[in-house]
């Protein structure tokens, strides 16, 4: 096995932080190996003025990085798993997931301590159709304002765009050390996360020895949970243009699965919880796909 590796990532502060976490873990596991960082600009980094559902959905933060990985310009690609399309580019696989951070969404506000305090007319920022549909189910009558940008940019927009609050992924806020900005961690019973949220995924070429390099750092519980979520997402065709939430939690050999599906108008069609023994994993996935497909 070679000992020099190139790690590809986006250039945002969060992406660089996550790549740094991966390299730190790899250095600890593989002393004597070296890991160089290569920053790659993606479509999602150059079109902040358009909704993700318009410019290409989940793949906009991944496509250019996958192209470099397929060409051999990089050896490992570090992603926020929630940004990875359900179908990977040919010849590529996710070689490992690091232990998952908090998968939930958080409410950030300087005016309110909880989304329960929001009243009709309040302005809430989010660029996610999933979050929009679920927050309107919980607090009908508020105004959802489209919001994009890096984590710190979106937090600043609370003031610059006169917002009563915003919703972000807890994992990104935590990894950037911005815990103090969080007013509320939103329970999954209210807001179901998107598939893979909170997990760092590392993508490699299918037949490359980088896959062996990643084997010792893969977190099996995260791998099992995210694999369930992504299998359901792939089967129903989920992406940024569909308000779809899927969150699996495995504990004591049981799977608890939260599902949420909305329509393009922001109405919630499904908001449900399923549970099964871990041994019935495939049956649970099929059941979830059937429920979601009925309303697609």
Image (spheres, rainbow, N blue to C red):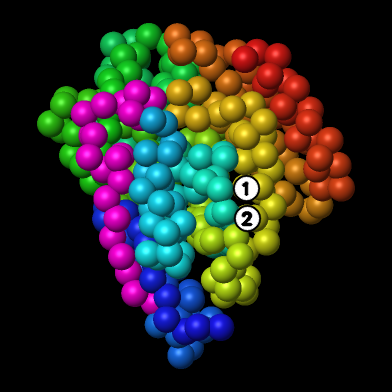
Q: CA distance from mark 1 to mark 2?
A: 6 Å
The picture quadrant where one finds residue 125 is top left
> Is residue 235 left or right of 139 when viewed as pictured?
right
Q: Which residue is mark 1?
A: 226
**Residue 244 higher or lower than 122, as above or below:** below
Does the segment drawn in magenta span residue 230? Answer: no
**Residue contact at pointers 1 and 2, CB within 8 angstroms:** yes
The picture quadrant where one finds residue 274 is top right
Q: Which residue is mark 2?
A: 222
Q: Residues within 10 Å of mark 2 (few under 14, many from 20)?
A: many
Which residue is farthest bottom? 32
The numbered dot on residue 263 is none
Q: Which residues are magenta?
A: 35-55
Q: Residue at x 47, y 19 (%)?
A: 133
Q: Residues within 10 Å of mark 1 (few under 14, many from 20)?
A: many
**Residue 241 higher or lower than 100, as above or below:** above
> Residue 198 versus residue 223: which sits nearer the camera?
223
Does the segment drawn in magenta span residue 40? Answer: yes
On-image quarter of the N terminus = bottom right
Residue 105 visible in this rendered orientation of the protein: yes
Q: Residue at x 45, y 67 (%)?
A: 75
Which residue is farthest left? 160
> Residue 211 versus residue 136: which sits nearer the camera?
211
On-image quarter of the C terminus = top right
Secondary-structure class at tag 2: helix
Residue 194 position within the rendered picture, expressed as x and y whole percent measured from the top left: 52, 36
**Residue 270 higher or lower than 63, as above or below:** above
Residue 82 position within the rendered picture, expressed as x and y whole percent measured from the top left: 48, 43
């Amino acid at each position: 096995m070679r000992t020099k590796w190139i790690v590809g990532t986006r250039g945002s502060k969060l992406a660089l932080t996550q790549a740094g976490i991966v390299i730190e873990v790899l250095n600890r596991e593989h002393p004597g190996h070296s890991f160089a960082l290569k920053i790659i600009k993606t479509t999602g980094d150059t079109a902040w003025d358009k909704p993700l559902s318009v410019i290409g959905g989940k793949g906009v933060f991944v496509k250019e990085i996958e192209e470099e990985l397929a060409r051999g310009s990089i050896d490992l690609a570090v992603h926020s798993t929630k940004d990875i399309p359900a179908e990977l580019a040919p010849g590529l696989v996710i070689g490992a997931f690091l232990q998952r951070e908090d998968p939930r969404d958080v409410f950030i506000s300087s005016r309110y301590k909880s989304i329960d305090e929001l009243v009709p007319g309040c302005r809430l920022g989010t660029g996610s159709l999933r979050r929009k549909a679920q927050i309107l189910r919980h607090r009908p009558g508020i105004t959802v304002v489209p919001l994009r940008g890096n984590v710190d940019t979106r937090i600043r927009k609370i003031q610059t765009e006169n917002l009563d609050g915003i919703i972000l992924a807890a994992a990104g806020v935590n990894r950037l050390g911005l815990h103090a900005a969080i007013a509320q961690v939103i329970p999954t019973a209210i807001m179901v996360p998107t598939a893979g949220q909170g997990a760092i995924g590392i993508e490699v070429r299918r037949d490359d020895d980088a896959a062996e390099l990643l084997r010792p750092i893969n977190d099996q519980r995260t791998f099992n949970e995210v694999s369930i979520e992504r299998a359901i997402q792939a089967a129903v065709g989920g992406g940024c243009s569909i308000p779809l939430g899927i969150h699996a939690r495995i504990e004591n050999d049981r799977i608890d699965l939260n599902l949420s599906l909305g329509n393009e108008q922001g109405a919630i069609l499904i908001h449900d919880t399923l549970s099964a023994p871990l041994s019935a994993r495939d049956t649970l996935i099929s059941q979830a796909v059937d429920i979601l497909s009925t309303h697609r």
